[in-house]
Amino acid sequence: MSRKKALRFKRYLPLYLMMLPGLAYLIINNYIPMAGIIIAFKKMNYRLGVLKSPWVGFKNFKFLFTSKDAWVITRNTILYNLVFMVLGTLLAIAVAVMLNEIRSKMAKKVYQTIILVPYLISIIIVSYLTYALLSTDSGFINNTILGKGAAVNWYSSPQYWPVILTLVFLWKSFGYNSIIYYATVIGIDQSYYEAAAIDGATKWQQVLHITLPGLKSTIITLTLLGVGRIFYSDFGLFYLVPMNSGPLIDATNTIDTYVYRGLMQMNNLGMSSAAGFYQSIVGFILVLTANTIVNKISREDALF
């Protein structure tokens, strides 16, 4: 190693040391488990182990896609994620803009803390909070808003749950996304707003022509990440919040909950692995496709 390279290595050694824990976590948590992909192509025999279990080719994938629930779980997973992405983005941006309009530093910190609290609450607690609202006998809604005479058996009425799950998701997640958008908003040069105000622009016009264009890169980045997970679902939201109620299966069953039930009830590890592999491949293709489209429209906003 030349003296120049040795000096450079010594100079950046603290950064390399800081990188090691994150790199180790990435390798252990994300790359080493990828070897388990072979389970998706095997009929798992616990006595023989992973490597000696017989190969079955694409039979696990065939089982996944030819089941009577294949269309329902795929439809639910995609449509819920699309609704979450659109409404979540709109709500998060609206809250970020409103936070930026608050002039009191103390009030701003208080509001940021309040909207972030739901994101930090365990999904198990959220499921019991939802149950406290919707319980047929002792729920807040049935006993106060609707009254006993108009009580609804929420956990046996699937028609209400697309709205309920959307509201729960938005309540729990919008605070975190709002903080991300707010961090971008406060980074916009204030001279733009001052010049716009001098020219007579209203607050709405300033938001429309200054704030939203300034948020474009952040919106595209978060949307691309969301597109990559469009075949994944929040397991806790779709399994714990509805309390795994049988009558709600058609409205709450997604790929992740279907795989979990298949693993627990049928002990079909191969099918579960095939579903996970399928989700990863589709997500990877969607991210590449979406990024390619963004790259052609606005190269500086693409991920790569």
Image (cartoon, rainbow, N blue to C red):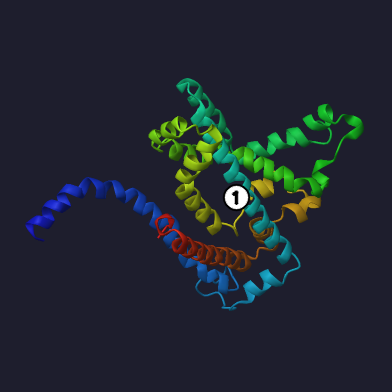
Q: Is residue 64 left or right of residue 109?
A: right
Is label 1 in a helix, a strand or a loop? helix
Q: Is residue 107 visible?
A: yes
| Res 152 → quadrant | top right
Please tell me which residue lies in front, 303 or 274.
Answer: 303
Q: What residue is at 35 percent from the left and 53 percent from the top? A: 23
Identified by mark 1, the residue type is: Met
**Other residues around mark 1 within 10 Å, as few (<14) / some (14–19) / many (≥20):** some
| Res 166 → quadrant | top right
Please tell me which residue lies in front, 175 or 243.
Answer: 175
Please tell me which residue lies in front, 120 or 91.
Answer: 91
- Labels in figure, total: 1
Q: What residue is at 63 percent from the left and 41 percent from the top? A: 170
Question: Is residue 78 shown above or below 19?
Answer: below
Residue 137 image offset from top left, x and y in percent:
84, 33
Say which residue label 1 marks: 85
Please tell me which residue lies in front, 275 or 223.
Answer: 223
Question: Is residue 25 shown above or below 173?
Answer: below
Residue 20 image offset from top left, x and y in percent:
30, 50
